[in-house]
Amino acid sequence: MTSATEIGLYVHIPFCQHRCHFCAFYLEIAHVDRITRFCSALIHEIRLHRRHHPLNGRMLQSIYFGGGTPTALSPDQLVSLLKVIQTTWPTSPTVEITVEAHPSSVTREGLTTLAQAGFTRISFGAESMREQDFVPIGRHGQVQDTATAVQAAREAGFLNINLDLMYGLPGQSLQDWQRTLELILPLNPSHLSCYALTIEEGTKLAQDIARHRVSPVDDQLQLEMESSTEQVLTQTGFIQYEISNYAKPAWRCRHNLLYWTGGEYLGLGPSAQSYVNGTRFGNVADLDQYEADLNENRLPITDSTRLSRSERDRDTLVFGLRLLHGVPLQAVAGADRDSEIGHLITDGFLSTDHERLWLTPLGRRYADSVAERLF
């Protein structure tokens, strides 16, 4: 578990130039007037939260601008929002400040503006280094954009650079995925997030698969790709610290670690989720309603749940087991699940040293199924 004093801030920027076919996040197509109105509403939300003192004087350990595509906003707009945050809440001297970006949406000048303003980490949605993979998932841009963006970010002063990659894409072979990894490594990122493609209900990709326009996901092939990822990256200096995440030494993502270790975070922007003072709550997933609520000096919260001890234990187990070092055994043991934990150990999905509990390599392949068996 993280220290009770640690807390992070997540800012959801709900704009993209295009919606990828696999994307199920709440977003709007970027238009200048909508972005301007959103920025004003977001500043109002920050000021309303300040009145409620949700951080209780705690310092922000991390600030994460996600989306959507945060760099759909101009660098000056992002810097202005960051300044409002920093003047509203105290931040740690070593705060991690991340901005997500599409590789084609940045320039060296804009990245320099962000780095000089205090952004310390950038995360590019590379997805693949094979342009044929972009077509079925509706991902715009070119493969070369990623290399260009990484070089520009490094020249601008970013030392902490993450690349998001996806495997198991329609038509992608094991060799194709291994080639993507081979092409990514010379870019020398400090962090890699490698996710298996999941088909979200209601997305265009789900519709295309249902209509037989795109081949369905091959679960067995995805497992082979996952195994290959572990082998290639751990042999080239990366440390796997979570099922989908790999980092060079000292470059683990501090913000995401809050989610996996029971840490707390405040979410801003439409659809953003929060976990503060033992309560989970979420914002309305509609930009118009978000703005309307704030115009009436009302926080745009649609649901709020105070977690019981058993619910907190459940989350500790589900999220904590994603970490390779697992969770303290005492934090998850209980008469209602001890038996199932024993079965999962016998079946080879879990392992323990009688102090901690963690997923075995086999368990990591079937993490979702393991989680289901524990409830």
Image: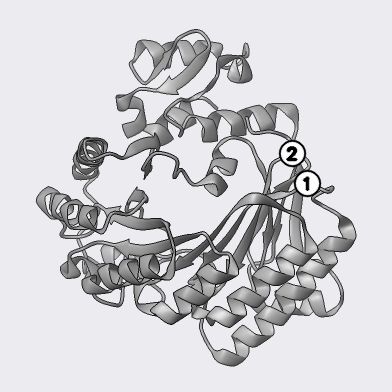
Residue 269 seen by the camera:
yes
Q: Which mark is residue 5?
A: 2
Name the residue carrying label 1: 58
Q: How is the image coloured?
A: one colour
Badge count: 2
Q: Residue at x 37, y 50 (%)?
A: 190
Single out the residue that lies furthest toward the top.
354
Could you tell me if the residues under marks 2 and 1 are in contact, i.e. CB atoms within 8 Å? yes
Q: Amino acid at mark 1?
A: Arg
Residue 17 seen by the camera:
no
Q: Is residue 182 above or below residue 373?
A: below
Q: Residue at x 15, y 60 (%)?
A: 171
With 63 as the anchor, is 125 left or right in this view? left
Q: Amino acid at mark 2?
A: Thr
> Residue 364 appears at what percent x and percent y?
35, 31
Tell me if mark 1 has few (under 14), some (14-19) or many (20+) residues whose alpha carbon lies within 10 angstroms of its own. Answer: some
Foreground of the two, 232 or 276: 232
Single out the residue that lies furthest toward the right.
51
With 34 as the anchor, is 211 left or right in this view? left
SS label for mark 2: loop
> Residue 161 appears at what percent x and percent y?
40, 57
Q: Is residue 311 above or below residue 118?
A: above
SS label for mark 1: loop
